[in-house]
Amino acid sequence: MRTAVNVSSGATHKISQFINGIVCLIVILLLLPAFTYIPMPVIASMLITSACRLVPKKLIAHLYHADKFECFMLLFTAALCIFIDGAIGLMIGMVISLMVNAS
């Protein structure tokens, strides 16, 4: 997620990852006791919001208009990764795509 944030903010050098890591370390060391008071649903909502902002909505819309089956496979695989397991979702999506494109 940090890499996507760096790219979307215009970072062009690898040092941005290092600076990001240092800032995260400082925040963790200084504010970790305060984080224990944040309810888990609040943390979950922040993670879901940041993950949704990383979804390339224009690319999905383009894929929907270009190839509806591929768009369905993208969304189906993403749902499997979210609700079941990341590795299993990717394997199922890969097998279905290979079976469809094998002919």
Image (cartoon, rainbow, N blue to C red):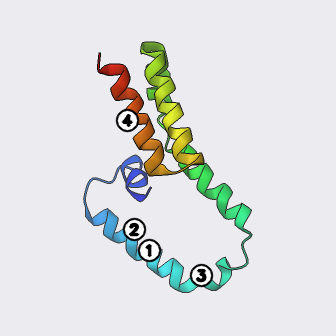
Query: Around disc 3, counting alpha carbons within 10 Å, would you say few (fewer than 14), some (14 to 19), or many (20 or more)?
Result: few
Q: Quadrant of residue 40?
A: bottom right
Q: CA distance from mark 1 to mark 3?
A: 12 Å
Quadrant in which the C terminus appears: top left
Residues at circles 1 and 2 in contact by the CB criterion of under 8 Å: yes
Looking at the rendered structure, the kind of residue marked 2 is Asn
Local SS, label 1? helix
Residue bearing mark 2: 20
Taking the spot 39% from the left edge, 76% from the top edge, the residue there is 22
Dot placed on the residue nearer the N-terminal end, 3 or 4: 3
Q: Give 81 or 32, whichever is nearer the viewer.
A: 81
Percent x, y for residue 44?
66, 59
Dot placed on the residue nearer the N-terminal end, 2 or 4: 2
Taking the spot 54% from the left edge, 41% from the top edge, the residue there is 80
Percent x, y for residue 1?
44, 55
Q: CA distance from mark 2 to mark 4?
A: 33 Å
Residue bearing mark 1: 23
Residue bearing mark 4: 94
Looking at the rendered structure, the kind of residue marked 3 is Leu
Q: Which of the labelled discs sits on residue 31, or is there none?
A: 3
Looking at the rendered structure, the kind of residue marked 1 is Val
Local SS, label 2? helix
Between label 2 and label 4, give the one nearer the viewer. Answer: 4
